[in-house]
Image (spheres, rainbow, N blue to C red):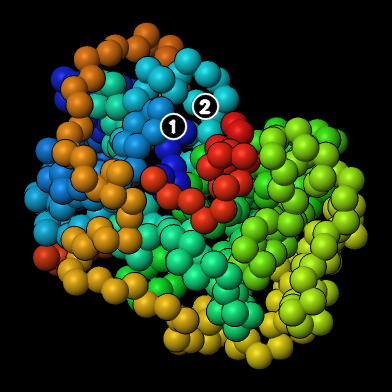
C-alpha cells in the first residue's frame, strides 16, 4: 500500500505530553508583590489542550502495512471529535532509530504536516507517542489512491488529467512557497477525498528549508519519477518536483511513466540519456507541457524559475482552468468515489482490509539519547483546539508489469 498508507517508516503507555514537559521553574510576581515558583508542565501551560493517546481510538480496519508499522482506519471514542473517522499511522521507534536518515525523515514528515495547511494536502489532526511507538492521526481519505483510479481507467482523457494536475500543481506550489520540496510524487501518493478532490500524502521523503538558491543532495524518491539531477547526485532543488509532475502527466495520458525498463539500472540509463517519446494522439498543448517539464537540465525546466508553480499554471494546457474556482473546490471532480458510508474501505487493497486490525504490543525501550530524537512529537491541530475553546464536539494488483515486477516502485530513502 502506498501514499499516506505507504509506510517505509511504523507499551506501557507513556504520554508524550509528559515526556515533553519542561522541568524548569520560573519566578513571577503575584498580587502581593512577592515571587512564586511555578513549574512549567504540559498541564500548567496547556490547560485547555486535549490529552490524546491510543485508547482514544477504536481500530476498525487495516489500510496499509510496511516494514516500520501500519495504517489503520480508526474511530475516535473519547474527547473532542468523538465518533469521527480518521487514519492512524503507527510507526515503531526501535525500527526508525536504527537509521539516522529514517529518524530525520520521520521528524521532517511530522513537522511538515504541522506546518502545512492546504485544500490539496492531507491534514494532520493529532500526533502522540508511547514508549515504543509514534502515532500520526490524519484525515481518512476514503476515496483511495489515484493509482487505483488510473488502474481502472488505463489512461485518463486530457480534461480529467488537467483537473488532477491542476490541483497537484497548486499543492506543490504551496509546499515550495514554504521552502519544502516533496520528492516523491507518484499516483500512489495522491489520495482522493470523498468528493473526488486530490490530497498529497506521505511526506517521509520531503525536505524543508529549500528556498531560492538552496540545493540538497539526498538520493531518494521512486526511480520512474526521479529527476536526472537526483540520479546523478549533482544537487537538486524544487525543480525535481516539476520533473515528477511531467512523469506523472505522461503516466496519466499514456499508461506508464516516460522512462521504464526491465531493471533499475536500465531505467536510470533511460532517464539520463533517452529522449521522451510521445504518442501522436496527444494534443499539441499536452505534448509541449510534458516536454518542457521533462527537460533534463533543471535550469531549462518549466517551473524552475522564480515563478515556480505560477509559470506552470500559465501554460496553454491549463487555458480553460479557473485557478480560483479550482482552489475553492468549486470545480466538479471527474470521478466521485462510490462510497456507502464514512467507514467504507472499498477503495483500498483487500490484502490489507481483510486483515484483523491489531496494534501489536511493543515493549521495546529506547535509550535516553534515542528518545530525544522524538522530543516534541505531540501535536493537536489548531482547528481541534479552537473547537475545544468554543465547546464544540464533532460528533495483489498490477496495471502494468513494470509496476510491481520488472521495475519495483519502492521509494529510496
In front here: 332 or 388? 332
Q: Secondary structure at mark 1?
A: loop
Q: Residue 71: where, in percent of width, then height? A: 31, 42
Q: 10 Å neighbourhood of mark 1: few (<14), some, or many (≥20)?
A: many
User: Residue drawn at (37%, 23%), measured in percent from left and top?
Assistant: 93
In front here: 355 or 304? 355
Image quadrant where residue 94 sits? top left
In front here: 355 or 5? 355
Considering every residue shown, the one lying at the far bottom of the view is 320
Q: Is residue 317 left or right of residue 31?
A: right
Q: Which residue is denoted by mark 1 in the rendering? A: 9
Task: Tell me the distance, in whole angstroms, between the alpha carbons under discs 2 and 1.
Answer: 7 Å
Q: Residue 101: where, in percent of width, then height? A: 57, 25
Q: Is residue 71 above or below residue 259?
A: above
Query: Would you say residue 290 is visible in this rendering?
Result: yes
In front here: 68 or 81? 68
Q: Is residue 333 above or below residue 176?
A: below
Mark 2 near mark 1, Cβ–Cβ under 8 Å? yes
Q: Is residue 99 above or below residue 264?
A: above
Q: Is residue 320 left or right of residue 146?
A: right
Q: Is residue 92 left or right of residue 162?
A: left
Q: Which residue is denoted by mark 2 in the rendering? A: 102
Q: Residue 65: where, in percent of width, then height? A: 35, 37
Q: Which is nearer the N-term, disc 2 or disc 1?
A: 1
User: Residue drawn at (76%, 33%), measured in percent from left and top?
Assistant: 265
User: Residue drawn at (25%, 58%), measured in percent from left and top?
Assistant: 345
Amino acid at each position: 500500500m502506498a501514499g499516506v498508507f505507504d509506510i517505509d517508516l511504523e507499551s506501557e503507555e507513556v504520554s508524550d505530553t509528559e515526556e515533553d514537559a519542561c522541568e524548569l521553574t520560573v519566578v513571577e510576581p503575584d498580587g502581593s508583590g512577592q515571587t512564586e515558583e511555578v513549574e512549567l508542565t504540559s498541564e500548567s501551560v496547556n490547560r485547555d489542550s486535549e490529552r490524546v493517546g491510543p485508547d482514544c481510538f477504536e481500530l476498525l480496519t487495516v489500510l496499509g502495512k510496511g516494514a516500520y508499522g501500519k495504517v489503520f482506519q480508526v474511530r475516535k471514542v473519547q474527547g473532542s471529535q468523538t465518533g469521527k473517522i480518521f487514519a492512524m499511522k503507527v510507526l515503531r521507534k526501535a525500527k526508525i532509530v536504527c537509521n539516522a536518515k529514517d529518524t530525520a525523515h520521520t521528524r521532517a514528515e511530522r513537522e511538515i504536516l504541522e506546518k502545512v495547511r492546504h485544500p490539496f494536502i492531507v491534514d494532520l489532526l493529532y500526533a502522540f507517542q508511547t514508549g515504543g511507538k509514534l502515532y500520526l492521526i490524519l484525515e481518512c481519505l476514503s476515496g483511495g489512491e489515484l493509482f487505483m483510479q488510473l488502474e481502472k481507467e488505463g489512461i485518463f482523457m486530457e480534461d480529467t488529467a488537467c483537473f488532477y494536475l491542476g490541483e497537484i500543481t497548486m499543492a506543490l506550489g504551496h509546499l515550495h512557497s514554504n521552502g519544502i520540496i516533496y520528492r516523491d510524487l507518484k499516483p500512489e501518493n495522491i489520495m482522493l477525498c470523498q468528493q473526488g478532490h486530490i490530497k498529497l500524502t506521505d511526506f517521509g521523503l520531503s525536505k524543508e528549508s529549500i528556498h531560492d538558491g538552496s540545493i540538497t543532495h539526498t538520493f531518494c524518491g521512486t526511480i520512474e519519477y526521479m529527476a536526472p539531477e537526483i540520479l546523478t547526485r549533482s544537487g537538486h532543488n524544487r525543480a525535481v518536483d516539476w520533473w515528477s509532475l511531467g512523469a506523472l502527466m505522461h503516466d496519466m495520458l499514456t499508461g506508464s511513466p516516460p522512462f521504464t525498463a526491465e531493471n533499475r539500472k536500465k531505467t536510470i540509463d533511460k532517464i539520463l540519456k533517452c529522449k521522451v517519446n510521445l504518442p501522436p494522439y496527444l494534443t499539441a498543448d499536452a505534448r509541449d507541457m510534458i516536454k518542457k517539464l521533462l527537460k533534463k537540465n533543471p535550469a531549462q525546466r518549466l517551473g524552475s524559475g522564480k515563478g515556480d508553480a505560477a509559470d506552470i499554471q500559465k501554460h496553454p494546457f491549463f487555458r480553460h482552468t479557473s485557478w480560483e474556482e479550482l482552489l475553492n473546490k468549486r470545480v466538479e471532480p471527474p470521478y466521485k468515489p462510490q462510497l456507502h458510508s464514512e467507514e467504507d474501505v472499498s477503495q483500498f487493497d483487500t490484502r490489507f482490509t481483510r486483515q484483523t486490525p491489531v496494534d501489536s504490543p511493543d515493549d521495546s525501550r529506547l535509550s535516553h539519547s534515542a528518545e530525544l530524537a522524538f522530543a516534541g512529537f505531540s501535536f493537536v491541530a489548531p482547528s481541534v483546539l479552537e473547537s475545544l475553546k468554543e465547546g464544540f464536539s464533532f460528533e495483489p494488483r498490477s496495471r502494468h508489469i513494470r509496476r510491481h515486477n520488472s521495475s519495483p516502485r519502492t521509494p529510496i530513502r
